[in-house]
Structure formats: structure tokens, C-alpha cells
Amino acid sequence: MKDYKLDTLCVQAGYSPKTGESRIPGICQSTTFFYGDSQAMADCFDLKSDGYFYSRLSNPTVSAFENRVAALEDGVCAIGCSSGMSATTLATLTVAGVGDNVLISQACYGGTFNLFGTTLPKVGIECRFFNPDDSAENIEKLIDDRTKFILAETVANPAIVILDFDKISAIAKKHSLLFIVDNTLATPVLCRPKKFGANIVIHSSSKYLDGHAAALGGMIVDLGNFNFKGNPRYASFNVPDESYHGLVYADLPVAFGTKCRAQMIRDIGAIMAPMNAYISYLGCDTLALRMERHSSNAKKVAAYLHNHPKIEWVKHASLPDNKYHALAEKYLPNGQGGMMSFGIKGDVKTCAKFMESLKLITQETHVADVRSSVLHPASTTHRQLSAEDLVKAGVPENLVRLSVGIENPDDIIADLDQALAKI
Ligand SMILES: *Cc1c(COP(=O)(O)O)cnc(C)c1O
């Protein structure tokens, strides 16, 4: 399966039925699994055989989706989580504890920013935010011997910053540090972070992987290319885990993925539900086709907005004068996805008038599904901030976030055009 191209993997990878079994994975809505023989069950508990015994640890429907995403990212193992946020949390707790620190791009998704800025510090994990546009020297200054990983997004939501993989992976390699990439908005169809030095990939599958705004989910993918053995930074991988029969994770072929499931999934249990795995698995069938269309539609919409007299600025890496255009050509040559933001000439009231005038494009908090949607942060998610604080947060009051769907591009542009004519 590994040798197939990505669009083939989107439809074929993850599950192969045996004779007489259902062609697509069934929804295995069961907490537990039958064993007639106690030795067989004991072998599962000891990780000696990989059968299912309790759905908090693994479930056949969830496995199908995990295997599919692992294949798409060219990883060795994937772990389904209840949401993108729980995936980030569980990946962090797999390596970090009290007194440790992590480096997070300050352009990250707002939820990620809150998790690292507010919640994880409460349990003793210090977060050091870095500006992804800063020099390698400055970013490196934040690293010490308690640093556990560097995390950034391939395409940052909603700042639309494109990750400079070579810069970050060189820093990570130099310090034998894990490099974790949130690949939610690019998806493996547009960029496979493993090719550019990432060790772990995280997804909010609630976005493009599902693609239909139907199921929340998250995924942690172990790319199998990081050596924990003997690395003093990762002592917990190099000593026996007494809670798991003295297993030394660094000795296993899949160190991170096994530790994450055996400890974090077992103890915290923020797992993906079988129904959500089933929906997301089906969504992935069309992922390659959808990403192509999201990208080509967004490119047309960005070019249209760029030339509109009532628009002050547009951020999408397809635009030749975009700050990240060169990085996008290097890392996302086949398209940059459907997410963009733009500034309307005017204030909050002008933006509200524009938003209310849209007929096809709807106002939503969600992004990255088949239907085009907009959000005006200054009057919704960020409404408590003053105009000055909005600028500091990188969301000026005239910023509109647009997630371009897969409708006919002429209809999307016509809707924007008639709404812009009303302001
Ligand atoms: C939405 C999102 C998340 C959080 O995912 P949920 O599934 O909503 O928990 C994390 N990272 C990025 C880039 C996202 O867009």
C-alpha cells in the first residue's frame, strides 16, 4: 500500500476486508470484546498480541481511520483522539511533565494558544512562544535541556503563516529535539511534513479530513523517524515503565506511539468515538479531490479580492506578492488550501453590513469543510477586545476570515461581489 500515490491512499488505505466482510469498515459500537481464553486476553494486555479488548484503548472502526491517516502521512502509527485539542494535549503529556518546557509558534490556532498559554502551565509545563518569522538564532535561544519539542502549523489558522520547515527542522535536529507539526489546514494531500523533517504530526480531523463538518476528531501520527534511545532529553522513554510491566519505550520500534497509547490514552481516555471515526474515514475518500478544488477556488477568490477597490489587503499564499509565497511554492506546490483572510476598507460596522449581505456564504465558527463560510473575529470570537488589542492579537477590526468551500467558484465570487457592492 505504501508505494501508492496519495490520491490512491485516500480511497484505499486503512482497511482491507477479508472474504465476505463488509467493503467499508463497519461501525463497531461496542465497549468490549469477547475472549474465550484468558491467556489470549492476557497477551493483549501485555502488548504481546494486538487484539481488541476495550474500546478506550483501541477499536476496529477507529483503527481503520488511524491506519488510513498513518498511511497518508507515511507514519508508523496513528492514534485517534476525541478532538484536535485532545490530540495536542495527549501528544504533549506523552513527553512533557512538571518543570519541562515546550516551544510553540505564536501564530498557532487560538485553541492551541490557550492550551499552552493558560492550561498546561497550571500543571507545570511551561510554554515558550516564538515568532515563526524570527531567525533560527533567536528561536534557538529559547531551548534548554528541559525543552521537549517545537510545535508549529504547516499553514497557521487563521494567520495563514506558512511554516519554514527547513529552518525549524535544522534547529530540532541540532538539539535532538522532537519537531511536531499540526498539519490540519494543509492535510497530507498538500504537504507531508515527514519529507521536511517533522517527527510527529497532529491533526484536527474535524476540519478537512472529515471535510463535511460532521464529526469532531483528532489524530496523532508517529512518523517513526526519531531516536529516543539514550537521549537524555527523553529520560522517561529510557527507563522501565512500572505501570506497564517495565516496558522501555525507547527500545520499541514505535516508541512515541506506544507510550502515547499505553499511558495517555489508557489513563486519560480522550478517544475518538467509532461513529466519528467512520464518518471521518468516509470523508477521507474524497480528500485529494476536495483539496484540489479548495485550493483552486481559493486562488481565484484571492485574486478577485486582491483587485477589489473596497478590499485593503488579502492573505493567501497563492498571491505572488504574499509574504509566504516562496515558502508555499517550496512546501505546498500543489495548492495552499481554502483558508484566507482579508481586510475590508472600513470599520466593524462596514464588516457587519458585508457579512449580513452574504447569501450563499454563511457565518460560522467552523472552517475547512465543503461549504464556504466566513467569520468576523472582531464582532464574534474576539469581541471583548479593544481596537488596539485586536491589532496586537493580529486580528484588526476589519479582518474577515474566509474558508473557501468546493462550490462553483463563480458563485462564491458573485456572492462576495454583491455583498461588497452593498457597503
Ligand atoms: C480546529 C483546529 C484545532 C483544534 O481542533 P478541534 O478538533 O476543534 O479540537 C487544532 N489545530 C488547528 C490548526 C485547527 O484548525
Image (cartoon, grey):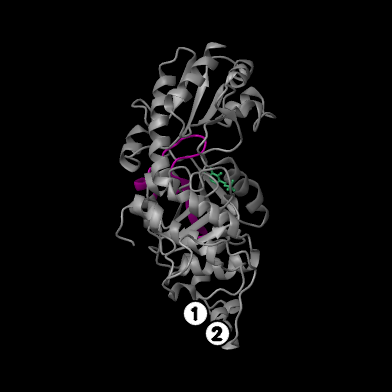
The picture quadrant where one finds residue 277 is: bottom right
Q: Position of residue 99 (x, y in %)?
A: 60, 60
Q: Is residue 48 visible?
A: yes
Check if residue 150 falls in the magenta segment. yes
Q: Position of residue 51 (x, y in %)?
A: 52, 76
Q: Which residues are magenta?
A: 141-168
Q: According to the image, label 2 marks what residue?
A: 40
- Given contact means CB atoms under 8 Å apart, are the residues at marks 1 and 2 in contact? yes
First of labels 1, 2 by sequence position: 2
Ligand 1 image position (quadrant): top right
Instruction: Spot the residue most to the right.
Output: 384
Does the beta carbon at disc 1 come under 8 Å from ligand 1?
no
x 57%, y 78%: residue = 244
Say left or right for 258 vs 165: right
Q: Nearer the viewer, residue 49 or 333?
A: 49
* Quadrant holding the N terminus: bottom left
Say left or right for 152 vs 35: left
Question: Amino acid under label 1?
Answer: Ser
**How dense is the environment of label 1, judged by Cα within 10 Å: few (below 14), some, or many (20 and up)?**
few
Q: Nearer the viewer, residue 69 or 350?
A: 69
Question: Amino acid under label 2?
Answer: Ala
Q: According to the image, label 1 marks what residue?
A: 49
The picture quadrant where one finds residue 73 is: bottom left
x 45%, y 72%: residue = 250
